[in-house]
């Protein structure tokens, strides 16, 4: 099975390479620019002014984390919690995770599975990609962050520790891994990538919204525990808290359970 | 005593339902090694579903199927290692090149391929290096079909399962395909092909199976099926003659009988007809050999 999985992984990476590279370069560049912008704000001493411009409901939304956000480290870490960046990365994992559905839709699955290739090999390929692709993108972000820090830490600003950058990266990767599993489970029963992608994407958007709303509306807090985003708090890391291993455990545990479900569902289905 | 070789394909009670629709009903089918088996049926008869069940792409509702003795479900990898498959609708990614497609699919087979054989296949189907380096989106329908044929045959599998293989091929490439089937058969391969083209089946197949609404209604050798069809006999006389004798057996049917022309359908020996013609002023005698379609179409219509 290892050889067949290797062939499939290589095939998928060849097809995805342009997207992966363009996204990695963009994310890394964004991180460099964030570091440069944060340095400029630090030099101009405008963090306090910016904080005062933030509307009250946003203050309530973010609480004490807002203080962290309006700092050199907070701006530098923006890429790890900005909605657009997280949405793009979730979009990537949904795209990769729905490859089995795309292969069935196109008919490529017929060609692959009519060879002596097990369905487990197809799913293993997807799991490998779902580990490697987000890790590659998040690593590119971390590299961009380090380059930015190397280029632009102004005098008077505390240089964020390398452990903070790695904690942010591990935390983000765990969130993406969770969505990988959920998307793979959806993709393993769908016949069309568009359907699987829409369901997974809509679910991600809804659960992200639930998590944000729960921060300002108490009744939603119980439901928010069902959202993977509830277990992803990068600003806590910026504030100096240690890597939340329990939250990461929940995200990776969910990912593992969803991947197991995906394998069972894909093995039982008609292709 | 040597154990007899298992059939290339053996299906027992193979059934597939999609909700209320029964696509394949209790199919019992045996295809012996070395045969070229034509699998016939109208659209929606269940041919492709059967093929997909053999490849374990679909899971049967009941029954089982085996390829060279390997169960298609429980021992699917071993079964599929012996199969070269060409789907009816070829699902190549449009952004891949022909060379990439062949590379990926050959990488998924267990045995190493003979480069010489692949080159020969590409030459037979007029594939040039430049064609292989083009993306699939630039291929015509026929080019995609040819690439699918090469990908199915390149592994030199002992069983080839081909779903409507000549659809979209030009006449020259159809000829190349028939020659290829003949060659692999001589080397001992078994070919299981579904087709709508009865003349093609008549030409290349040893045996046929006819599927009607999921049920196998006929499985026989092509020669036997042909014998089930009547020969059409037309006799023209130089001068008026008496009507045909009434003592002919029921297997000789009079279609038309005028003073100078008889048209007959003969399902048996021509002996009684020849005897009756002795001494008559025969100007012309035309016997049209029985054709496969004369029988198969009746099975399609449900009149046989």
Image (tube, rainbow, N blue to C red):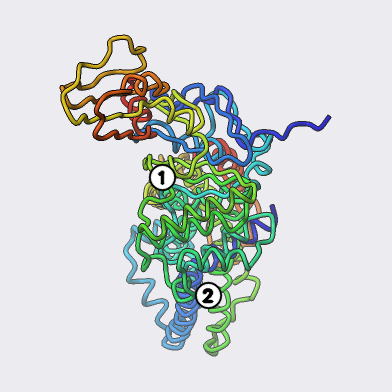
Instruction: For mark 2, give the secondary structure.
Output: helix
| Image location (x, y in percent) of residue B201 | 43, 41
What's the CA distance linking mark 1 and mark 2?
Answer: 74 Å
Marked residue chain, label 1: B
Q: x%, y% of residue B112?
A: 69, 61
Q: Chain of mark 2?
A: A
> In which quarter of the view is residue B68 placed?
top right
Quarter of the rendering containing residue A146: bottom right
Q: Secondary structure at mark 1?
A: helix
Q: Which residue is mark 2?
A: A73
Residue at image x 50%, y 44%? A188
Q: Can residue A120 be seen by looking at this rendering? A: no
**How crowded is the residue under tag 2: few (<14 C-alpha within 10 Å), some, or many (20+)?**
many
Q: Which residue position is annotated with label 1? A: B200
Comparing B183 with A56, the one in front is: B183
Q: How many marks?
A: 2
Tell me residue A250's x, y (percent): 60, 47
In the image, residue A92 sits, relative to residue B68, either above or below, namely below
Q: Residue furthest right?
A: B1
Both marks 1 and 2 on one chain: no
Quick check: B206 above or below B261?
A: below
Instruction: Say which residue appears at 58% left-offset and 78% top-offset.
Output: A143
Decide: marks 1, 2 in contact (CB < 8 A)? no
Q: Nearest the camera: B246 or B188?
A: B246
Residue at the (49%, 27%) spot, across then down: B219
Residue B56 % position (x, y)? 56, 38
- In this view, the mark in front (1 or 2): 1
Label 1 neighbour load within 10 Å: few <14, some 14-19, many 20+: some
Position of the C terminus of chain B, as image quadrant, is top left
Q: Nearer the viewer, residue A108 or A70?
A: A108
């Amino acid at each position: 099975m290892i050889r067949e999985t290797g062939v499939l992984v290589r095939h998928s990476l060849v097809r995805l390479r342009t997207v992966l590279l363009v996204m990695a370069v963009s994310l890394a560049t964004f991180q460099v620019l964030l570091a440069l912008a944060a340095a400029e704000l630090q030099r101009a001493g405008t963090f306090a002014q910016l904080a005062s411009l933030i509307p009250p409901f946003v203050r309530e939304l973010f609480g004490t984390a807002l203080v962290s956000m309006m700092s050199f480290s907070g701006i530098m870490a923006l890429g790890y919690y900005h909605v657009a960046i997280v949405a793009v990365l979730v979009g990537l994992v949904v795209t990769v995770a729905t490859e089995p559905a795309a292969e069935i839709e196109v008919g490529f699955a017929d060609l692959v599975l009519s060879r002596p290739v097990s369905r487990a090999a197809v799913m293993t390929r997807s799991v490998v990609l779902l580990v490697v692709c987000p890790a590659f993108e998040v690593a590119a972000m971390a590299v961009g962050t380090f380059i930015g820090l190397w280029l632009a830490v102004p005098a008077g600003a505390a240089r964020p520790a390398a452990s903070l950058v790695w904690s942010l990266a591990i935390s983000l990767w765990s969130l993406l891994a969770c969505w990988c599993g959920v998307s793979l489970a959806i993709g393993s029963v769908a016949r069309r990538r568009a359907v699987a992608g829409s369901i997974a994407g809509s679910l991600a958007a809804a659960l992200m919204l639930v998590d944000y709303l729960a921060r300002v509306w108490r009744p939603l807090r119980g439901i928010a525990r069902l959202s993977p985003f509830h277990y992803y708090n990068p600003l806590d890391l910026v504030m100096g808290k240690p890597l939340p291993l329990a939250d990461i455990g929940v995200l990776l545990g969910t990912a593992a359970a969803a991947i197991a479900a995906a394998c069972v569902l894909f093995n039982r289905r008609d292709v | 005593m040597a154990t007899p070789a298992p059939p290339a394909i053996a299906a027992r009670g193979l059934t597939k339902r999609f909700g209320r629709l029964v696509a394949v009903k209790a199919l019992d089918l045996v295809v012996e090694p070395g045969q070229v088996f034509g699998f016939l049926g109208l659209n929606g008869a269940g041919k492709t579903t059967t093929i997909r069940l053999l490849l374990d792409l679909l899971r049967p509702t009941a029954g089982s199927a085996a390829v060279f003795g390997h169960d298609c479900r429980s021992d699917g990898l071993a079964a599929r290692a012996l199969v070269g498959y060409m789907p009816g609708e070829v699902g190549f990614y449009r952004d891949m090149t022909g060379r990439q497609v062949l590379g990926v699919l050959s990488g998924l087979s267990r045995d190493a391929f003979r480069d010489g054989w692949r080159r020969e296949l590409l030459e037979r189907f007029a594939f040039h290096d430049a064609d292989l380096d083009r993306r699939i989106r630039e291929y015509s329908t026929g080019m995609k079909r040819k690439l699918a044929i090469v990908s199915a045959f390149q592994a030199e599998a002992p069983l080839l399962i081909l779903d409507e293989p000549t659809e979209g091929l030009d006449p020259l490439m159809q000829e190349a395909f028939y020659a290829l089937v003949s060659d692999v058969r001589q080397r001992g391969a078994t070919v299981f092909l579904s087709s709508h083209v009865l003349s093609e089946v008549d030409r290349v197949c040893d045996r046929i199976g006819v599927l009607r609404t999921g049920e196998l209604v006929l499985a026989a050798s092509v020669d036997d099926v042909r014998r089930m069809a009547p020969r059409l006999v037309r006799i023209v006389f130089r001068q008026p003659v008496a009507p045909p004798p009434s003592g002919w057996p029921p297997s000789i049917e009079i279609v038309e009988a005028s003073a100078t022309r008889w048209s007959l359908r003969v399902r048996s020996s021509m002996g009684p007809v020849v005897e009756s013609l002795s001494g008559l002023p025969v100007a012309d005698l035309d016997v049209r050999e029985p054709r496969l379609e004369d029988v198969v179409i009746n099975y399609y219509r449900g009149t046989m």
